Amino acid sequence: MTGHGTAVRTYGGARWLLVLLLLLVTACTGGQGGGPGGGPPSPSETSGEIVVASGRDVTGKNGIRQQLIDAWNARQGVSGWTARLVELPGSADEQRSQLLGALQSGSARYDVVNLDVTWVPEFAEAGLIRPLGEEAVADPGDVIPSVAGTADWRGERYSVPFNSDVGLLYYRRDYLAAAGVRQTDLSRGVGWEELHELIDQVDRHRPKGYEAGWTTQLAGYEGRTVNAIEAFASAVPGRTLTDADGRYRASEDDLRAGLTELWSRTADDTLEDAFTSDEAATLSDFADGRTAFLRHWPYAYRTLHQTFSDRQLGVAPLPGAAVLGGQNLAVTSSSPRARKAAELIRFLTDADSERCLLDAGFAATRVSAYDDDHRRCTHVATASAAPSATGEGTDRMPRDKAGRPRYARDILLPALTHAVQRPRTPLYGAFTQTFSTELGALFTRRTPPDQALVRDLDEALRGALPD
């Protein structure tokens, strides 16, 4: 552990160098909203192609994002304006590195970037995306307040929420029924103590192929950070690891409480493979029947219903706090078509587009998508029939009378409303790498957290996030 701590302390010194470099970039680009080729967009822009860079669309090939781009292109007619979606390969961390490298070097011409909500402060601080005016957001009061809070940095709007995300609990209703559980509808929510009691019942009536109570994403990447933040936020409600400016503000008591909560969740009843698994692996393990419960994101609702019926599968709020995820659209500082790019963002995030995203399996960012029965997906005629992440074209997702995913209004919307954010800081990359690395000791030792682990984590985070 000593060598581990030394490496992190060295990494913390590198963070100070990065802070200086970011300040130099900001100074050279004219401050907030400057950046390469920055400055206010020209009132008259030459028509052409607007390039949108994004990660993989979980609704499959020719998914809903591409369909919305196509719908916007159709509206442009013969104006000469078109938009093209470029999907970046790799994990979220790899996509972040690709975007940073491309925008800083000018090696790729992107007008709009689809950023993970945790990246917005970093890209804004570095001058790689520009502030957006009110015209980029249609009816801002309709955006879910918790989600709207991910769009700004230092009092300025730099992005518009496109699709959201939040942790949810999926479970096998048929496993519970076979174990003698009378009430297999957990949509009202359960606590961790009740969850472990249910797992004990299933353990006494082990179905074929069943191995452990639950699984989640605990490999050494962002999934581990998310699970840990959920445990920390549950153990110390209202407390965060950083302040509004991204400065480290946690105490050792906060860390000890969070580590103890994370330990209690994962010490027992957890599938062994969870400690080396990401989203895809845990989804597969749950679908194969190896566990009774799964912590995952909203897109799993559609994917799992390609295999399971309502009698077999259920979804509920995650016990305790759930982390807010999602992606926001931003205009790059180097875009020569910033005004038209902002117009595209307005279309892609308006009420109709958000209803299309919800129908296709994403978590929408607008309240109206969930509670307005008259709001329908009019931009795209086939949103509800979009291919699933498994490539299956038949829509088996349960829907309510208004055509929304059945769980959307009563489970997904409240979960998004009450979700907690991860630390908002321009040094988020340093934070999550340090956090997930240090947490590895909790899982490799397989012993409750001690004072040495608390002290090492505190020291590492202070190096990654100078106060």
Image: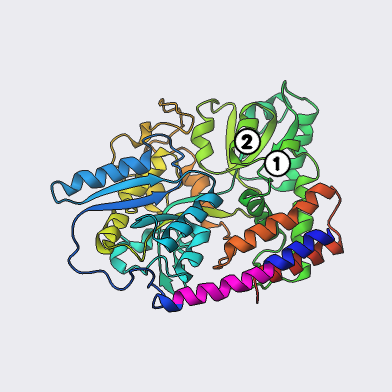
Magenta part of the protein: which range?
A: 12-26
Residue at 32% across, 51% down: 51
Hey, what amino acid is under mark 1? Thr
Q: In the rendered image of this protein, does residue 60 appear above or below residue 428? A: above
Figure quadrant of residue 176: top right
Where disc 2 sits, the SS reads helix
Quarter of the rendering occupied by the C terminus: bottom right
Where disc 1 sits, the SS reads helix
Residue at 81% across, 28% down: 204
Question: Could you say where residue 182 lies in the image, as x and y percent from the top left?
Answer: 69, 30
Question: Could you say where residue 304 lies in the image, as x and y percent from the top left?
Answer: 54, 31
Residue extending furthest left? 78
Residue at 33% across, 57% down: 111
Question: Could you say where residue 72 lies in the image, as x and y percent from the top left?
Answer: 25, 47
**Within 10 angstroms of label 1, few (less than 14), some, or many (20 or more) residues?**
some
Figure quadrant of residue 274: top right
The answer to whether the residue labelled 2 contacts the one labelled 1, judged by CB atoms less than 8 Å apart, is yes
Q: How is the image coloured?
A: rainbow
Residue in the foreground of this view, choosing between 361 and 284: 284
Q: In the rendered image of this protein, does residue 128 appear above or below residue 75? A: below
Residue at 55% across, 52% down: 93
**Would you name the residue on which mark 2 appears?**
281
Hey, what amino acid is under mark 2? Ala
Residue 276 circle label: 1
**Within 10 angstroms of label 2, few (less than 14), some, or many (20 or more) residues?**
some
